[in-house]
Amino acid sequence: MTDLALAAVDLGASSGRVMVGEVGQGGLRVHEVRRFPNTPVTVGGTLHWDIARLYAEILAGLRSAALRSDLASAGIDSWGVDYGLLDADGKLLGDPVHYRDRRTDGVAEQVLSKVPAAELYAATGIQQQPFNTIYQLVAASPAQLGAARTMLLIPDLLAYWLTGQAGAEITNASTTQLLDVRARSWDLPLAEQLGIPRHLFPPLRAPGTLIGETLPEATDQAGLGRPLPVVATASHDTAAAVAGVPAEASGFAFISCGTWSLAGLELGQPVLTEASRRANFTNEAGADGTIRYLRNVMGLWLLQESMRTWATSDLDGLLDAAAREEPLRAVVDASDPAFLPPGDMPARIASVCRHTGQVPPRTPAEVTRCILDSLALAHRQAIRDAGELADRDVRIVHLVGGGARNALLCQLTADATGLPVLAGPVEAAAIGNLLLQARSLGAAPADLTGLRALIRASHQPIRYEPAGDQRRWQAAARRATRR
């Protein structure tokens, strides 16, 4: 193992960051060099990602990283499903559309009338979400699709601008609902059945693949001094985060908690049963041929949108006040589609509570407590369902990502699941990104067990023991889903 410095670009749905990792015999040291907001824009009634600004932020972050360290490589991870379309000259045909845009309303029903849900799940293993790439492409403008020659998911698009090399890293490609989950190849017959041109799908690449070196323009704009190798890491942020879980043995569940909560298990094979489909579990590709068997839960988006409505940034004050509120007074199903679009989240939470026969929360503290109790309930149900559907015993929960900073949510998750929760690292996605790069360069252990041992040696998680009465959580779960 040789000490190396690497850059991880980690893009979330609400913010992005560039981290420098120093990896080698001395362990793993991680430093944030740039953080920036990821703010979508509405143009002509359509919600878009401001992709050019994100690229400019990445270049600025790489510049800061290069001033700090002699970089050996860089890698990019981001959220899934969203993409850009390139024309025959490699030019972007408009800013990528945000997955929360309403253009896919009703499209899933159109697709499922042609490809039954059970058949689609058996092929792709992906849960039904209205924003999956398959539905976005069906909803896309025929003129735009006709002009397009290549589809690149967000991290692949940004890597293309850096290197000029087009491709699709497999962990993110698996979120499209257009990848054969067993063969790990594009399901081109499925795409053609839905009128999606097969030439849009670029070659697939695995985590650890060298994409190429930065182009002269990118090298100059980032102030790198010399071309920098760009490595395909696990480019879906949840895949990177799961690789960054400091698990010591099997029998663990993970929760990657940020804008979304992704809760489930790491498996060797997909679970494609009818019961799994009906429970809306997804089988996404992970590092080293693993499967991320998980359920999407709406996550801290509920609190982020509430704070935007209240025009406050005082998260610590809200959490302190919420901790003093009566527990489980009002709860909601955190996966309710009513919570997906941007808007007045407290009003929607109150409406759902009334619909389920509960007294709605009124104050910000009450709403915050309702959100955190509801997220803990959703974590509980996802982990229990995953264990039952995959026939796995779960003994401990690893909660990583931004939610690991939220001590109240971590304790409530332990209470709800009845299992110990190990919280951290907060930057698990960036750490997974860095270590998978480092491994490809010979500076980190060859398998996930060794990588995770390196993480444990450098980042000690905080342990939360379960407390309270499980019967209260069970009763609350029934209220949350009552109709």
Image: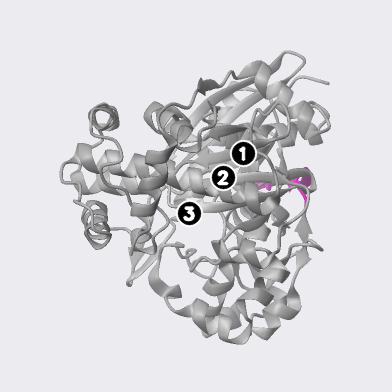
Residue that badge 1 annotates: 253
Residue at the limit of the structure toward the front, as seen here: 471
Rate crowding at label 1 as few (under 14), some (14 to 19) or many (20 or more) other CA atoms within 10 Å: many
Q: Disc 1 or 3, which lies upstream in sequence?
A: 3
Residue that badge 2 annotates: 383
Measuring 62% from the left and 39% from the top, which residue is drawn there? 253
- Given the image, on which type of amino acid does mark 1 rest? Ala
- Given the image, on which type of amino acid does mark 2 rest? Ile
Return the x and y of residue 192 as percentages of the image width and height.
70, 83
Rate crowding at label 3 as few (under 14), some (14 to 19) or many (20 or more) other CA atoms within 10 Å: few
Q: Quadrant of residue 459?
A: top right
Measuring 74% from the left and 72% from the top, which residue is drawn there? 187
Q: Is residue 299 magenta?
A: no
Label 2 element class: helix
- In the image, residue 119 sits, relative to residue 424, either above or below, namely below
Look at the image and give the residue range highlighted in magenta: 206-216
Query: Separation of disc 1 and disc 3 at Cα?
Result: 37 Å
Residue that badge 3 annotates: 52
